[in-house]
Image (cartoon, rainbow, N blue to C red):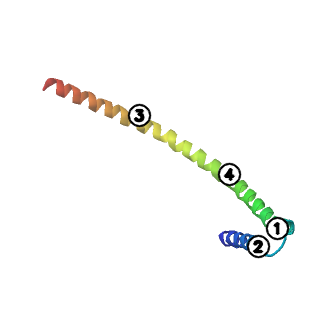
């Protein structure tokens, strides 16, 4: 898609430069620019439609993958909760023991 975009950009700028530098009246130049812009728009319609359809397909195919990832991540979070609680409990116990030790000393 990068090459095509570069090609189209170059084509448009080349066309505009050619038309603006050509020895024609302003009205003729504007009309020619409009005609050329219309031609480019018409030529790119099929490509735009194809890209749109492919994007929709990709999005549709991604939905079950995203759902599966959500479910699996939810399961992992649920599995991690008791582990985190045990770590918090042990950390609090260790802190309390350290406080008691410091009070005695």
Circle 3 — which element? Answer: helix
Circle 4 — which element? Answer: helix
Q: CA distance from mark 2 to mark 4?
A: 45 Å
Place of residue 93 in the rendered image (x, y in percent of width and height, measured from the top left): 29, 30
Image position of 73 with respect to 44: above or below: above
Label 4 crowding class (10 Å Cα cut-off): few <14, some 14-19, many 20+? Answer: few
Circle 1 — which element? Answer: helix
Q: Which residue is mark 1?
A: 33
Q: Are marks 1 and 3 in contact (CB under 8 Å)?
A: no
**Which quarter of the rendering shows the N terminus?**
bottom right
Q: CA distance from mark 2 to mark 1?
A: 8 Å
Q: Which residue is mark 2?
A: 15
Give the camera-side residue of 76 and 56: 56
Q: Are marks 2 and 1 in contact (CB under 8 Å)?
A: yes
**Sequence-first tag of 2 and 4:** 2
Give the camera-side residue of 99 and 16: 16
Place of residue 56 in the rendered image (x, y in percent of width and height, measured from the top left): 75, 56
For residue 64, which numbered disc appears in the image? 4
Circle 2 — which element? Answer: helix
**Sequence-first tag of 1 and 3:** 1
Label 1 crowding class (10 Å Cα cut-off): few <14, some 14-19, many 20+? Answer: some
| Residue 24 quadrant | bottom right
Place of residue 25 in the rendered image (x, y in percent of width and height, measured from the top left): 84, 70
**Sequence-first tag of 2 and 1:** 2
Q: CA distance from mark 1 to mark 3?
A: 69 Å
Label 2 crowding class (10 Å Cα cut-off): few <14, some 14-19, many 20+? Answer: some
Q: Is residue 93 left or right of residue 78?
A: left
**Sequence-first tag of 2 and 3:** 2
Question: Which residue is at 81% across, 75% downward?
Answer: 23
């Amino acid at each position: 898609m990068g090459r095509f975009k570069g090609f189209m950009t170059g084509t448009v700028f080349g066309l505009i430069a050619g038309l603006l530098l050509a020895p024609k009246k302003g009205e003729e130049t504007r009309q020619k620019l409009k005609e050329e812009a219309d031609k480019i728009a018409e030529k790119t319609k099929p490509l735009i439609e194809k890209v749109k359809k492919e994007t929709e397909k990709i999005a549709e195919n991604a939905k079950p993958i995203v759902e599966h990832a959500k479910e699996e991540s939810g399961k992992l979070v649920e599995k991690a909760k008791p582990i985190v609680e045990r770590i918090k409990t042990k950390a609090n116990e260790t802190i309390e023991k350290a406080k008691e030790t410091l009070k005695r000393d």
